[in-house]
Image (cartoon, rainbow, N blue to C red):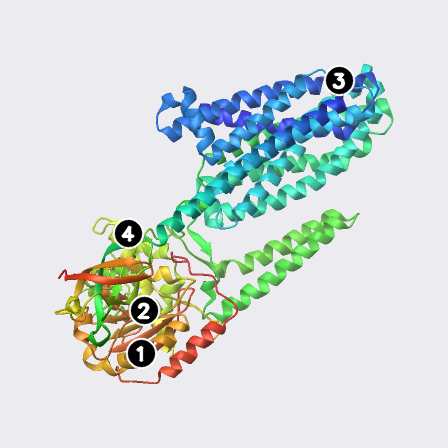
Amino acid sequence: MYALGLCARWLHLASSILLVGAATTIALAGRSDRPTARRWEHRVLLGSRGLALAALGSGLIVLGLQTALFEGRGGAALEAGSIARVLIETQAGRVWLVRFGLLAILAAFLWSRLHVESSLDWRAARAQAMLLGAAALVPAAAAGHAAAVEPETARAIALDGLHVLGAGVWVGGLLPLALLLWTAAAEPGADARPYAVLAARRFSRLALGVVLVLVATGTLMAIANVGNVAGLVGTAYGRLLLAKLGLVVAALALAAVNRAVHLGRLAGDGPTVGRPAMRRLATFLVGEGLIALAVLAIVATMTVTPPARHEAPTWPFSVRLSFAALEGAPAASARVLIGSQIAVLGLVGLAAGLAIRGRRLPLVAGALVVLGAGVGLALPPLAVDAYPTTYLRPSVPYHAASIASGATLYREHCAACHGAGGAGDAPAGLRPARPPADLRGPHTALHTAGDLFWWLTNGIPEAGMPAFGRELGEEQRWDLVNFLRALSSGYSARGMRPAIEPDRPWLVAPDFTFAVGPTPPRSLREYRGRRTVLLVLYELARARPRLAEIAGRDGTLALLGVEVIAVPVDAAPDAIKRIGPEPRVLFSVVTEGAQAIVTAYHLLAASPHVEFLIDRQGYIRAVTRGSGAAGDLDKTIAEVQRLNEERTAASAPEEHVH
Amino acid sequence: MRAWKVVVLLNLALVVGVGWGYVFWGLRAARLDRELALARAAAASGVEREWVVAGVVRAVLPELDVLVITHGEIAGLMAPMTMGFRAASPKIHEGISIGDEVRFTLRGVPPNVVVTAIEKTK
C-alpha cells in the first residue's frame, strides 16, 4: 500500500509538473510554419493529453489512499461517500477538489479540436494551457507540509507554490526540448534547426532565472522544515533532502556543461559542429530530465515523511562543532581566528581562479590547498564530543514539577558522588576514577540537554560514572536534565540584582502550574505576551510587612500589567486563611502547586524571601532577595516601568533546552 | 469556433463560476454572522440568569455586603479573576471567612448579579 501510494504520488507530481513544462516550452519556442516544428508541437500536445489523464488517474489513487488514512480503514478508499466527505471537509480535500476541476478543464481543453487560424488563436490557446497547468499545480502547496508551518503559514505556502511552479518550468521543459533537438538534428528535420536553436537559447535564459528562484525558495523552505544541521543529517526527512540536493547538484552540473559548451556550438556548421552538438545537448537534457524525475521521486517520499522540525534527530557523528568550546581558551580562539582568515583567503583565491581565464588550474589548486589548511587549522579546536542524542529535544518541558522530581531523583542517585549541592564534593565513600563534575558551573550550560541525557542513560565508563538507562525511565532522566539546567542557571544567576539589565533577557523562567483554591489551574505560560509576573516566595512569619506593602499598591501594579503570584515557602494548603484579613491580600496566593515552584525557584535564588520579576517573554529579569521586611516597592515599580518601556521584544524562550 | 474565442469563453466561465460561488458563500456567511450576533444579543440581554461557581473567599466587607472571591471562569459573564460580588442579604455571608473554599450562586440580569447563596466546600 505504501509503495502504491508513493508511486501514485510520484506519477501525479511528475505529470502535473511536466504538463506545465510542456506548455511553457511550446509557448517559449513560439509559433512556426516549418513542418518539423509543427510535428514536434503536435507530439508534445499528444504527450500532454496523456499526462493530463495520468495526473487525474494517479491523483484519484492518492485521494483514495488519503481517504483510507483519514477514515482509518482501507475500504473507505473505494467509497464515494467517504471520498466526498474528505473532499468537502478537509483542507487537503478542498485543494484536491480545485486541482481536479482545473485538471479536468485542462484535459478537456487539450483534447478539444481548436481552430487555429491566426497567431492570436495560437497564442491564446498555448497561454491558456500554460495557465491551467500552473493553476492546477500551484495549489498543491496548500495541501503539503507548507500548510503546517507555523507561524507565517501563508508565506510558507507561497514559497512552496513558487518552488513547484519553478520546478514545472525547468524540469518540465527538459524532455520536450530534447525531443525538438533530436528531431531537428536528424536529416529530415533540417527545416526546424533555426527554430530549435532559438528555442534552446530562450529556454536556457529562462532556466537560469528559474534555477535561482528554485534555490532561493528551496533554501527558505529547508530552513522552515528542517531548521538546523542536526535535522539535516539526523532525520529521515533531512537525509532525503540531502539526497535531493545531491541529485540537483548533478543536474545543475549537466546544465552548466550545456550552457557553457553545447549551447554556443548549436549555430555552428551543420554537419560538423551544429548537429553533433544538438544531439549531445539532447542527450544531456534527457539525462537532466531523468535525474529530475528521480528528484521528484524523492520529493514524493518527502511529502509523506514528517518534516525534520517535528522529529527527534539522531546525530550520526561522534563530534560536533561548537563555539562554546572556546570559552576560557584564548589560545584556541586565536587559532580559530587565524585559521578562518586563511580559509577566507583561500575562498577569495578560488573565486579569483574561477573568474580569471588562463592559468586557472594552478590558481585553483593553490587556493584549495590554502582553504584546506585554513579549515584544518580552524576546525579542530571547535570540535567537542557528541552523541546520538546530542540534538534530541527534551520530551519533558522545563517545568517546575519536572525540576522538583529531578531534585528528588538527584538526592537519591547522584548526590552520593556529585554532592548535595552539585559541586562534585561528596564527602567520601564512593571514589570514582575521575573527580565528579561540578554540575553547578557554566560547564553544564555548555553541553546540550541531549548530551546530559546521553551520559545519564549510558554513563561515562572512563570516568566511573554509572549508567542509569535501566534504572530510571526516560521521563525521569529528562527530569534530571531539567533539574541540572535549573541548578546551573542558578549558579549563573548568582549575580542577578533587583534592577533589570535593559534589553538583556537571558534567564529563562521555568514554567509552573498553580491553583488558587478550587479555581482551575493556571500556568506561567498563559501570561506570556500578556502580563509581567512578580513571583513572590514568602515565609509568612516574617513577610507580613512586605505582603502588606504589595497589597497596598495592588491597583498600581495591575495597571502596569503586573500579575502578582505569591507562593508560601511552606506550601501550606490553607495559605489564604493563614494570611487572614490583615493585610488584605487580593492577588493570587498559591494553594496548590507551591511545593514544586519553591523547589525549582529556590535553585535559581535561595533566600528566606525572594521575588522574581518575569517579563512578558518569560525571562527572569530581576531578583530581589530579602527577609520579608517592607522594602521600597517604588523601586520594583520603577523596574516594571523600565520593562514596559523596552522596545525590542526578545523572542520567547523555547519550551525546550538549546 | 476560433481558438481565441474558446479561450475567452472558458475564462469567462471560470471567472463567473468562481465569482458566483464566492458571492453565494459570502452572502451565506454574512447571513450566518448576523444570525449569530442576534442570538448572542438575545442571550446576553434582558434575561435573568443563574450561575453556580467555585471559588475561594479573599475578603468579606460586611459594611458593604460584599464578598471578594477568586473564582474560575463564569460562562458568558467573566473570565477567571478576583472580584467583589454583592450579597443579596447580610445573612448570606454569615459564617464565611477569608480562605474558605466555597461554591456560590450568582443570579441576575448581567451585569447586575448578586450572590444569592453560598456554601463552604472544605
Find residue A561 and report its image quarter: bottom left
> What is the crowding at mark 2: few (fewer than 14 residues within 10 Å), some, or many (at least 20)?
many
Identify the subunit bearing mark 4: A
Asked whether the residues under the numbered discs 1 and 3 touch, taking CB atoms below 8 Å apart as contact, a structural biologist would say: no
Apparent side of residue A472 relative to residue A274 in the rendered image (left or right): left
Q: Which residue is mark 2?
A: A440
Q: Secondary structure at mark 2?
A: loop
Q: Earlier in the sequence, mark 4 or mark 1?
A: 4
Which quadrant would the N terminus of chain A be assigned to in this image? top left
Q: Earlier in the sequence, mark 2 or mark 4?
A: 2
Query: How far is mark 3 from mark 2, CA to CA?
Result: 84 Å
Asked whether the residues under the numbered discs 4 and 1 touch, taking CB atoms below 8 Å apart as contact, a structural biologist would say: no
Q: Which residue is mark 4?
A: A457
Q: Secondary structure at mark 3?
A: loop
Query: How far is mark 1 from mark 3, CA to CA?
Result: 85 Å
Query: Could you tell me the amino acid type at mark 1?
Result: Ile
Q: Which residue is mark 3?
A: B1
Q: Residue furthest right?
A: A269
